[in-house]
């Protein structure tokens, strides 16, 4: 069963204070580290700027959407992101979960509402 990760992030003051050369070095090292992800079955579905002209838009400037063959691959990517120092430079939130469908989701919502 596939697993998904959704990231929302914006550059923070520490990133904005970095000289352009240091930013480029950091980004180049990320690109190099990401080279082997496909061999682990990790797929990038989207890395893009977020749209702000939608209802209830996030204030975050960028998003990442990833698909994994299992939860362990997701955890491996998250560990790599943390080790890279990414969270020092970006205000970041993650959401992860297993593949699911509409009927399953409605059942989960109904179950949760009964617990309140």
Image (cartoon, grey):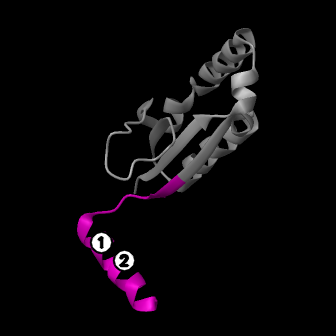
Could you tell me which residue is drawn at 71 percent across and 41 percent down?
Answer: 82
- Viewer-nearest residue: 27 or 38: 27
Q: Which mark is residue 39?
A: none
Compared to residue 61, the image places residue 30 above or below, namely: above
* Residue identifier under label 2: 108
Q: How crowded is mark 1: few (under 14 residues within 10 Å), some or many (20 or more)?
A: few
**Left or right: residue 70 compared with residue 23:** left
- Residue 99 position, x and y percent, is 37, 58
Position in image of residue 101 (x %, y %) = 28, 63
Q: At numbered mark 1, what does the secondary structure look like: helix, strand or loop?
A: helix
- Crowding near the residue tagged with mark 2, few <14, some 14–19, many ≥20 C-alpha atoms within 10 Å: few
Would residue 101 be counted in the magenta stretch? Answer: yes
The spot of residue 1 in percent (x, y) is: 40, 57
Q: Which residue is drawn at 45% across and 90% down?
A: 115
Alpha carbon separation for disc pair 1 and 2: 6 Å
Q: In this orientation, which residue lies closer to the viewer: 82 or 98?
A: 82
Q: Who's the residue at 58% across and 36% down the image?
A: 10
Q: Which of 104 and 48 is in front in this view?
A: 48
Q: In which quarter of the image is residue 37?
A: top right
**Does the image show residue 42?**
no
Q: Are marks 1 and 2 in contact (CB under 8 Å)?
A: yes
Residue under pointer 1: 104
Question: Please, what secondary structure does the residue beneath circle 2 have?
Answer: helix
- Quarter assignment of residue 13: top right
Tell me where the magenta segment starts and ends, as one range.
95-116
Q: Is residue 59 left or right of residue 90?
A: left
Q: Residue furthest left?
A: 103
């Amino acid at each position: 069963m596939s697993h998904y990760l959704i990231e929302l992030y914006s550059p923070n003051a520490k990133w904005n204070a970095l000289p352009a050369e240091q930013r480029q070095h950091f980004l180049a090292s990320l690109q190099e580290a990401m080279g082997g992800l496909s061999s682990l079955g990790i797929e990038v579905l989207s890395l893009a700027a977020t749209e702000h002209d939608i209802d209830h838009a996030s204030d975050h400037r960028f998003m990442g959407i990833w698909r994994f063959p299992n939860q362990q691959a997701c955890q491996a990517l998250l560990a790599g992101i943390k080790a890279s120092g990414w969270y020092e430079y970006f205000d970041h939130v993650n959401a992860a979960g297993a593949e699911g469908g509409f009927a399953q989701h409605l059942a989960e919502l109904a179950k949760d509402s009964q617990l309140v």
